């Protein structure tokens, strides 16, 4: 049996993944699979305490262990770094105190992993325990400061935004309501644990092969941490086993591998264990939220006030952006007269939180959609009808100054309403069963880069060789979402050649133009547009070469399949022949293109978070059954509609929608990055932290709606993150329908459901 | 650290090596035999990424001590097509139908779970040529996938099963 995909593709047929063959045969190499000659193995020594002063690190015993090549500790080893320019608060190895259990303190390199591990256990660290700080928000009694350099105590960041007059809008409302929700934090659990190999070569160049979503940012931060110029650091990303936001910045193990390599003169591999991954974290923030909305007599939103308090963990990470994101996208689904947002992020002595699929928008979306359902109930309206009255229209500007282009939101509502037979079934199911609705929207790429610069967000260089092959170079990173396939397919389509001609070089900072990375659902939009620009250049070079050759004007040259020809004339030449004419005339053929989004409309502080070239839209209906004896919530079916603009790779879009929906299901029902009172993770392994298995997944009916977006490459928007968001509140709303109890905390584990039922029983008894 | 001589037949080829008694089969396959197709997602028996066959039975290599499978026949993802070819007197370059189906049905995203899933699914199809949805779910319940949401994996197993029956 041969693969039918990819072998003889026309430019039109789209394979699921151009590299599927390598992944199904075991040939695909991930970061932990690549063997370097003379490679050594590293291991990090992690803190067993959540908060403690380091009194001393004794490496002597470890150094004398068999096979040990190098041992390092924090002080003096690296400069501080951080993903946000204003938050350079991280050290690879803790310097004077540890601020979460699992924080790296020292690192060992040895001949084998087992030797490194044994030596790491022989490192003696003396600690003076400090009280752990486990709750975000103003403390009742005074607590030690987590980041001692912070000028605002344990408050990391506070932001306030107001658009229009919210106070008046709420006061004059004909109906208003307030709701609260605590959204629990959770981990990405990409199946591949992080891994890196770093080689500090004798010539001063540092070559890093790492499982990262953002090679460009890792290059920048690593150069800073190591105190070397950026051009000496090369970051390459092998096949990546999933990211979901969890591999989106520089991590201690990457710095430590480089430092150990410098000490021992050999390439050093560090692979995280699953437990390490839960400590490295950067997952979804736990957020406590409150929303208050005033409606006019027509049930339209007059004003909304939204507050969120984020539990950030021990470091800044993406936290400033995360905080803004918890307030940014409420108005992209609902039109409102006025909007106010207050956000706070607090340092706690837990593994740092960061971006996870839906970055900062997932938690507020859960509350907002639960809130809208309760409003609909109060007003005696169908929940979908209430949303319809309030949709932010296509081609409009939101109250917080975001430009919406195409919107398939109304179509998403229609689709899930129809698929779920909402009108016929909602409210008619027996006790214990329910249907719940929610909708959402997401960015197709952040409008601004993480550090300010005027350069393209994505660049593509196309070379066409005399063998007729097309080489596309772009810094984008395929994290498993299919970015390489999209790039190759777009190149083939744009140049009018078959896919088998296209070869890619991606995810390598030395040989490709910069692409900022796989975050904010930006890759299809930005690398796609850069590719189209480069392809257009290349095509004009070839068209002109053909025109010269035939002595006709360039406009007379047309395409017929791969061939070039002259309309009405007899001239015709194959692709490779024209390539050779052009190379003879111009020398080796190369063309490049870049993409920079339009500047954001808003001018206020914080206006950089939220703008995007286009927004995707989603809706979900969840059908649940709740057992009120054991508290178990069973999701029986999901109906998900998504507007990704033109789906460039329909099978892949379906895969993103399903994968996102199931990840959302995990967040709704079972996943919690939770801690004991002493700061220990409750279960830093896949038995203690459950994610959905094949047995947990209900039937999911998927609809793809929408129209080509003028800003997207060939009309495309995103599908990677948006479809997750509505699933969680749809489940929450369905559970409310099923058992008549409002839940105020995620995930909906049986104990929470039982407690809520118990509360209701007590209230009814009174 | 006690060591012993380990004899295995891996993907049809006899192998003999000296290995520490505490070595897992996963370490032997990946680090000593350089067959990196078998993945390590948790090293604790919880994710299924390390699934390979020991005497035809899918096993979690990360929680199998190598010395407990002395003289056994091991098939890893790299050897699956060869195993299939032998059964069906087919060209060694051909894929097992499930490998092809995974690629065609969109069952592969990041691909990290794929080798384990394919080994688990191929064992199911060998014993149960047209499995029901429930049988597929049961057989793959120990395999985590964080990317696909599983539906396309179920479709791939079903499609491969159909194709194997058609061609039988
Ligand atoms: S690596 Fe063996 S089950 Fe996870
Ligand atoms: S494809 Fe990524 S874990 Fe299954």
Image (cartoon, coloured by chain):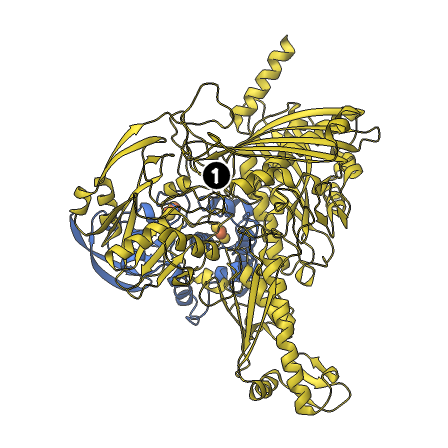
Chain colours: A yellow, B blue
Asked whether residue A499 is in view, the answer is yes
Does residue A713 lie above or below A573 as drawn? above
Crowding near the residue tagged with mark 1, few <14, some 14–19, many ≥20 C-alpha atoms within 10 Å: many
Q: Nearer the viewer, residue A245 or A696?
A: A245
Q: How many marks?
A: 1
A683 relative to A286 in the view: left or right: left
Q: Residue at x 65, y 34 (%)?
A: A341
For residue A60, which quarter of the picture? top left
Q: Quadrant of residue A532?
A: bottom right
- The relative height of residue A471 versus residue B126 in the rendered view (above or below) is below
Q: Nearer the viewer, residue A357 or A429?
A: A357
Looking at the picture, how far across and down is residue B84, in whole percent? 42, 64
SS category of the residue bearing label 1: loop
Q: Residue sitting at 77 percent across and 29 percent down? A: A169
Q: Position of residue A39 (x, y in %)?
A: 27, 59
Drawn side of residue A540 relative to residue A33, left or right: right
Residue furthest out toward the right? A298
Query: Measured from the top left, where is residue A297 in percent x and y?
Result: 84, 28
Does the closest atom of ligand 2 sit within 8 Å of the Cβ of label 1? no
Indicate left or right for A489 with A177 as reference.
left
Between A134 and A622, the residue placed more toward the observer is: A134
For disc 1, the marked residue is A353
Residue A322 to residue A12: above or below: above
Quadrant of the image for the C terminus of chain A? top right
Specify the farthest residue to the top. A766
**Residue A697 appearing in the image:** no
User: How far across and how far down the image is residue A401, in percent?
Assistant: 71, 44
Which chain is disc 1 placed on? A
């Amino acid at each position: 049996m041969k693969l039918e995909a990819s072998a003889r593709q026309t430019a039109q047929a789209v394979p699921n993944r151009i590299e599927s063959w390598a992944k199904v045969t075991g040939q695909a190499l991930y970061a932990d699979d690549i063997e370097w000659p003379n490679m050594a193995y590293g291991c990090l020594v992690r803190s067993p305490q959540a908060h403690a002063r380091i009194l001393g690190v004794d490496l002597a015993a470890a150094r004398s262990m068999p096979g040990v090549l190098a041992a390092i500790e924090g002080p003096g080893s690296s400069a501080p770094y951080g993903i946000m320019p204003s938050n350079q608060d991280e050290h690879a190895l803790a310097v004077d105190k540890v601020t979460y259990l699992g924080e790296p303190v020292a690192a060992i390199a040895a001949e084998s992993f087992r030797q490194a591990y044994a030596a790491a256990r022989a490192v003696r660290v003396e600690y003076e325990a400090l009280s752990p700080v486990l709750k975000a928000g103003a403390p009742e009694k005074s607590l030690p400061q987590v980041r001692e350099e912070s000028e605002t105590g344990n408050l990391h960041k506070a932001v306030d935004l107001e658009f229009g007059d919210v106070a008046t809008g709420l006061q004059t409302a004909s109906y208003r309501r307030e709701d609260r929700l605590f959204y629990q934090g959770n981990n990405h659990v990409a199946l591949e644990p992080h891994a890196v190999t770093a080689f500090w070569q004798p010539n001063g160049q540092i070559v890093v092969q790492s499982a990262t979503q953002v090679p460009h940012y890792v290059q920048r931060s690593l150069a800073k941490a190591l105190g070397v110029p950026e051009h000496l650091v090369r970051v390459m990303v092998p096949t990546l086993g999933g990211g979901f936001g969890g591999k989106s910045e520089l991590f201690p193990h990457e710095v430590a591998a480089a430092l150990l390599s410098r000490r021992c003169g050999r390439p050093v591999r560090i692979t995280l264990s699953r437990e390490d991954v839960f400590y490295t974290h950067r997952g979804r923030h736990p957020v406590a939220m409150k929303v208050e909305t005033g409606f006019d007599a027509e049930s339209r939103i007059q004003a909304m006030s939204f507050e969120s308090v984020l539990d950030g963990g021990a470091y800044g990470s993406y936290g400033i952006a995360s905080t803004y994101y918890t307030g940014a996208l409420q108005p992209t689904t609902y039109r409102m007269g006025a909007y106010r947002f207050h956000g706070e992020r607090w340092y706690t002595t837990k593994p740092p939180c960061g971006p996870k699929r839906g970055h900062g928008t997932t938690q507020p979306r859960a509350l907002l959609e639960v809130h809208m359902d309760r409003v609909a109930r109060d007003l005696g309206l169908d929940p979908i009808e209430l949303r319809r009255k309030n949709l932010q229209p296509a081609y409009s500007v939101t109250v917080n100054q975001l430009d919406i282009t195409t919107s398939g939101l109304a179509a998403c509502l229609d689709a899930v309403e129809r698929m779920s037979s909402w009108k016929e079934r909602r409210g008619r199911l027996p006790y214990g069963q329910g249907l719940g609705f929610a909708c959402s929207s997401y960015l197709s790429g952040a409008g601004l880069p993480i550090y300010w610069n005027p350069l393209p967000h994505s660049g593509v260089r196309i070379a066409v060789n005399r063998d007729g092959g097309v080489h596309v170079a772009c810094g984008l990173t395929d994290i498993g979402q299919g970015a390489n396939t999209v790039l190759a397919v777009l190149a083939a389509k744009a140049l009018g050649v078959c896919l088998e001609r296209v070869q890619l070089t991606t995810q390598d900072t030395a040989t490709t133009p910069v692409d900022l990375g796989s975050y904010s659902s930006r890759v299809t939009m930005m690398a796609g547009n850069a590719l189209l620009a480069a392809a257009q250049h290349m095509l004009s070079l070839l068209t002109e070469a053909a025109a010269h050759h035939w002595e006709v004007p360039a406009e007379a040259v047309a395409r017929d399949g791969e061939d070039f020809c002259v309309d009405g004339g007899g001239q015709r030449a194959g692709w490779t022949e024209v390539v050779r004419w052009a190379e003879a005339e111009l020398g080796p053929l190369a063309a490049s293109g870049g993409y920079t989004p339009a500047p954001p409309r808003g001018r206020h502080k914080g206006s950089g978070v939220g703008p995007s070239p286009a927004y995707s839209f989603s809706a979900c209906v969840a059908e649940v059954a709740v057992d009120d004896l054991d508290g178990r919530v069973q999701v029986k079916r999901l109906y998900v509609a998504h507007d990704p603009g033109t789906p460039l790779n329909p099978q892949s879009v379906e895969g993103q929608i399903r994968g996102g929906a199931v990840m959302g299901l995990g967040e709704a029902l079972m996943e919690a990055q939770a801690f004991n009172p002493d700061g220990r993770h409750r279960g830093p392994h896949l038995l203690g932290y459950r994610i959905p298995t094949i047995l947990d997944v209900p039937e999911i009916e998927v609809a793809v709606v929408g129209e080509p977006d003028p800003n997207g490459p060939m009309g495309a928007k995103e599908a990677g993150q948006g479809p997750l968001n509505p699933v969680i509140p749809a489940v929450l709303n369905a559970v409310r329908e099923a058992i008549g109890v409002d839940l105020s905390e995620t995930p909906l584990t049986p104990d929470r459901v039982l407690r809520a039922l118990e509360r209701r029983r007590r209230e009814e008894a009174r | 650290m006690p060591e012993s001589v380990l004899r295995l037949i891996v993907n049809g080829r006899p192998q003999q090596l000296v290995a520490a008694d505490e070595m897992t089969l996963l370490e032997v396959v990946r680090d000593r035999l350089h067959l990196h197709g078998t993945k390590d997602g948790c090293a604790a028996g919880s994710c299924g990424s390390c699934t390979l066959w020991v005497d035809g039975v899918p096993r979690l290599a990360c929680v199998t001590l190598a010395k407990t499978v002395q003289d056994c026949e091991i098939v890893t993802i790299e050897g699956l097509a060869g195993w299939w070819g032998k059964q069906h007197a087919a060209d060694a370059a051909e894929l097992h139908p499930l490998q092809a189906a995974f690629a065609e049905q969109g069952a592969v995203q990041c691909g990290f779970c794929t080798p384990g899933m394919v080994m688990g699914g191929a064992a199911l199809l060998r014993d149960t040529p047209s499995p029901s949805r429930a049988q597929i779910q049961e057989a793959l319940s120990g395999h985590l996938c964080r990317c696909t949401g599983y539906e396309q994996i179920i479709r791939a197993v079903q499609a491969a099963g159909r194709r194997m029956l058609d061609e039988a």
